[in-house]
Image (cartoon, rainbow, N blue to C red):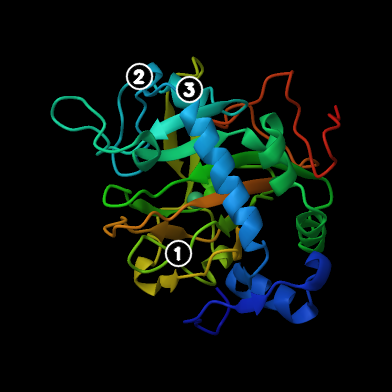
Amino acid sequence: MDGDSTTTLPVWPAPEGGRLSAQMLEDYQRTGVLVLEDFVAPAACDALRRRAAELVDGFDPGSAQSVFSTTEQTQHDDRYFIESGDKIRYFFERDAWNDNGELQAPTIDCLNKIGHAMHDLDPEFDAFSRTPELRELVNGLGIRDPGIIQSMYIFKPPRIGGEVVCHQDSTYLYTEPESCIGFWFALEDATLQNGCMYFIPGVHHEPLRERNRRNAEGTRTQNETLDPAPLPEHLKVPAPVPKGSLVVFSGRTPHLSGPNLSERSRHAYTVHVIDRSCHYPADNWLQRGPDLPLRGFDHRVNRP
Ligand code: FE2
């Protein structure tokens, strides 16, 4: 960590054409986080929400009752999750069902997320994920040969939206050398009440704490400790942001979010970018089949 302790996160208006200023880049390098307001037009946020709702309408909730939880060590077979790296799959909140095994609310308000390849498999998600502005931004952050490794549509539904415990994304999207950067789009206002993100600025200069690996059978994943120092969670800073904001954060920047105890959802969309020139281990949980090679910001042209 550099000498200055930081108690606020850098917030900037979206840069023209996605071209980061020297001051924005310095802020990102210092804190590991950058909030860019109005990066996406409200209409584009609404369109992506409508598309997600259409996908959910086409999903049979009885077909997969997979729960995504960061607070429980699940011991069951996790193949539905582990095999979702090149698919569009649906994950429920832990509290989605009542005692009779029925969903407590409309499906869209019971889901934790959709993941993890909408950006390659759905034209509308593809277009949202591959704008010239985002391409330029990624370029400005120094990723020479970008590949969009993962997308997630996060619902954080009213009342049952679960907390996400403090973690670093490079734990899960590990490359050698590390190259992961997260791009978190607020599709609705994210507030202290509906479970906004929190970040620990400056800690991206510290070592990665854990690495997640899948087992040889591809049925389970497990974290291994790389550095036992606890993440300094008491230094977390909330990031309430208005709809249309983009939060950029390093794969080493610790972050978390609280539960949504409010009556309003907190939809967000994330993509994670890695550098394709870096080594991507075969025991990372997220793997892609040969039919869906890792793509950068080229439009609908698969590159080997
Ligand atoms: Fe994360």
Callout 3 amino acid: Asn
Question: In the image, is 101 to the left or to the right of 52?
Answer: left
Identified at 50% across, 38% down, the residue is 53
Most extreme residue toward the bottom is: 4
Report the quarter where the C terminus lies: top right
- Give whichever of discs 1 and 2 has the lower sequence position: 2
Q: Secondary structure at mark 1?
A: loop
Ligand 1 is within 8 Å of the C-beta of the residue at disc 3: no
Amino acid residing under circle 2? Gly
Q: Is residue 216 visible?
A: yes
For the residue labelled by badge 3, is the local secondary structure a helix, a strand or a loop? loop
Quadrant into which the N terminus falls: bottom right
Q: Which mark is residue 62?
A: 2
- From the top left corner, tell me how far across and down residue 227 is, in percent: 46, 52
The residue located at (40%, 68%) in the rendering is: 191
Q: Label 2, label 3: how many angstroms apart (C-alpha)?
A: 28 Å
Query: Along the polypeptide, which appears first: circle 1 or circle 3?
Result: 1
Identify the secondary structure beneath mark 2. helix
Whether residue 70 sits left or right of residue 294 in the image: it is left
Q: Identify residue for label 3.
A: 215
Q: Along the polypeptide, which appears first: circle 2 or circle 3? A: 2
Measure the C-alpha gap from mark 1 to mark 2.
Answer: 30 Å
**Mark 1 highlights which residue?**
190
Q: Nearer the viewer, mark 2 or mark 3?
A: 2
Q: Residue at x 33, y 52 (%)?
A: 163
Quarter location, residue 238: bottom left
